Image (cartoon, grey):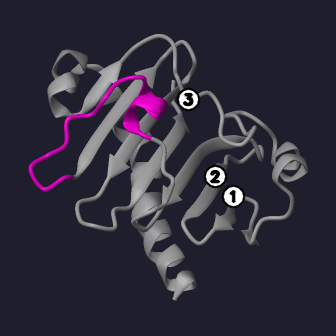
Amino acid sequence: MFRLRELIVAGCLVPALFGFPVTARAQSQAQSQNAVSGERQTDEPVLREYRGIKIGMTLDEVHQKLGDPKEKSDRLDIYTFSDSETAQIYYDESKKVMAIAVIYTGRDNNAPTAKAVLGTDVQPRPDGSAYLMIRYPKAGYWVSYSRTAGEEPIVTVTMQRMVP
């Protein structure tokens, strides 16, 4: 069951993670409208690392900090820290961290709040779901916070290197 959930989450995240760089140029032209669409741009990120892992670290540095992943390849490591917390670390062709996605599942999942991740609260939609992405051009990456609707929400916190 947990393996199926990982595959579903990975299937949802991979297109999102790799689709954002393709649209980054078009989005940068519309920054003034982004606050309305769930995006913002600011200078200093609140979230700078996850469990000591930062954007740009090498695959070997990640393995030294977190140990052996549950599943690994040259481009993706999956770590399961509990029944409710899974991290996916994505690597570029030079084996450096380009994205970190942390998925918190279940009712009592100890997920961080949007304020802890982004430095600001996120106004939930009527169904209880919420999303906000903030770009940090000086830091070279963006951070997003996403929460699904329902009594057992899935919270996804993502950091991804921005494409120049």
Residues rendered magenta in the picture: 113-128
Q: Is residue 46 left or right of residue 30?
A: right
The reply to whether dot 2 and dot 1 touch (C-beta < 8 Å) is yes
Image disc number at residue 90: 2
Image disc number at residue 75: 1
Residue 2 pos. (x, y %): 55, 82
Q: Residues within 10 Å of mark 2 (few under 14, many from 20)?
A: many
Q: Is residue 117 magenta?
A: yes
Q: Residues within 10 Å of mark 3 (few under 14, many from 20)?
A: some
Q: Is residue 2 magenta?
A: no
Residue 112 pos. (x, y %): 48, 43
Dominant SS type (magenta): loop
Real-space Cα separation, disc 1 to disc 3, in angstroms: 23 Å
Residue depicted at x 55% and y 53% = 102
Residue 163 pos. (x, y %): 51, 30
- Mark found first going from the N terminus, 1 or 3: 3
Residue on which the image places disc 3 = 47
Q: Amino acid at mark 3?
A: Leu
Real-space Cα separation, disc 2 to disc 3, in angstroms: 17 Å
Residue depicted at x 51% and y 24% = 164
